[in-house]
Amino acid sequence: MPPPVKLIGLIGKTNVGKSTLFAAITMATVEIANHPFTTIKPNTGVGYVRKKCVHVELGLPKCDPRTGMCIEGNRFIPIKVMDVAGLIPGASKGRGLGNKFMDDLRQADILIHVVDASGSTDLEGNPVAPGTADPVEEAKLIQIEIDEWFKSVIKRIWENKVSKQVYNIKYPIDYLARNLSGLSIKKSHVIEALRKSGLENKKLKDWSINDVEEFAVALRRIAKPIIIAANKIDVDPAYDNVKRLQKVFGEENVIPVSGLAELILKKASRSGYIKYIPGDPDFKLSSKRLSDQQKKALDLIRRKILSRYGSTGVQQLINHAVFNVLNLIVVYPVEDHHKYTDHYGNILPDAYLVPRGTTAKELAYMIHTDLGKTFLYAINAKTGERIGEDYVLKDNDVIKIVAASAH
């Protein structure tokens, strides 16, 4: 069974460079235009988190990824990315494309809010002179729309299902979690949201609509956290606006990015003009001949973005979302713990992104249900140590699962 893949949802006002950022992350071909509502149907693609591959630590000459890739000792592990239609203030009330397209976000594990840090689009998504629009106001208003949308979804589930059964249910938290599972919400999310909204000791039958709304906002922040991609950092007013965004939303929640620069570098690398690994602070020119215009464009990226910010920010954005906000670690399941291979001799073929705190037995279930059911013990391939079902996995662990069917 292939490793489970997390889903990142890209949200934001129309015309903030969302489609360009999506293309830069996934290298998918999407329509990119300078007018509102370019994206009507959600675009989905595959992006990658970057991590130093464990084969380097183990002193192995290479690895054989079944999904993703390994470039110069950097493992690129797949994640799904969805770019939904642009939002405008009032979308949750049906303005623009309304919340029909917000419902595409139901399965997302985290939301990346793409903001025009250059201040060159108004709240309706129309182009204006750089620096004249306020990205802080934009970020606040769109996040309010997301909360309003989520509240409406939770209230609908409450009114149509939960409220009708509150007097009959034996395990209310389990029942609530089951009814919210279509939103990729787990029981642990529900418990945490009850605590954050101060409702853990209040019976469901005593909840008011206000309680439902308070719970919904807390649940959105836990189950679908939002981080900000401060896009268009190549435009001059962006530098100060990034600082303002970080001051209001927290430095850790705002990542400066240039989707356009990343897209140009990836295309130039793919065409053989430069050597560039996503996330690197610089690139190298290849021997392939460049036109003066191409050289000028690459030099501009180097001077205005790479030298100033340390990277285009795109890879850092994805890594921050997955490793810091979702708090995932990487684990490598193998069949031969001496050679670090699968049944066919492939070295470290799979890299699983799993929540911090995942146990060896839970990993077995992720690999295959039967493996979880017949789990006997696991082996830490790095140490040769035999470990039990309650062993809590560590980042970069290489694990062999031993099941009853193997004996």
Image (cartoon, rainbow, N blue to C red):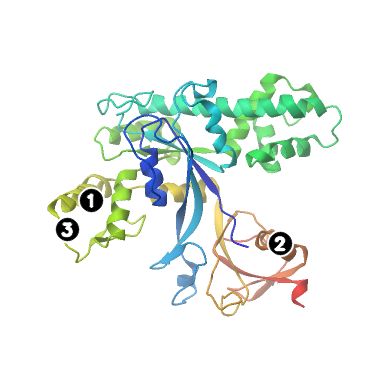
The residue that disc 3 covers is 290
Residue marked by disc 2: 361
- Spatial distance from mark 2 to mark 1, Cα to Cα? 47 Å
146 vs 75: above or below? above
User: What kind of residue is marked 2?
Assistant: Lys
Q: Which residue is mark 1?
A: 302
Image coordinates for residue 248, horizontal then vertical, percent = 42, 30
Judging from the image, what secondary structure is the residue with disc 2 in?
Answer: helix
Q: Secondary structure at mark 3?
A: loop
Compared across the picture, whether 127 is left or right of 74 comes to: left
Image quadrant assignment for residue 15: top left
Q: Position of residue 364 (x, y in %)?
A: 69, 63
Q: Position of residue 388 (x, y in %)?
A: 73, 66
Q: Which quarter shows the N terminus?
A: bottom right
How far apart in space, not on screen, are marks 3 and 1 (Cα)? 16 Å
N-terminal-most mark, 2 or 1: 1
- The answer to which quarter of the image holds residue 180 is top right
Mark 2 → mark 3, Cα distance in angstroms:
54 Å
Indicate which label's residue lies in the foreground, 2 or 3: 3
Q: Which tag, 3 or 1, sits closer to the chain's start?
A: 3
Look at label 1 and name its amino acid: Arg
**At which x and y percent is residue 237?**
26, 32
- Tell which circle, 2 or 3, labels the residue nearer the N-terminal end: 3
Query: What element does badge 1 sit on?
Result: helix
User: Looking at the picture, does residue 7 appear above or below residue 123?
Assistant: below
**Image point 68% across, 33% down: which residue?**
195
Asked if the residues shown at circle 3 and circle 1 are in contact, with their CB atoms under 8 angstroms apart, the answer is no
Examine the rendering and report whether any part of residue 316 can be seen: yes
Q: Nearer the viewer, mark 3 or mark 1?
A: 3
- Residue at x 32%, y 55% (from the top left corner): 266
Determine crowd level at label 2: few under 14, some 14-19, many 20+ residues with C-alpha closer than 10 A: many
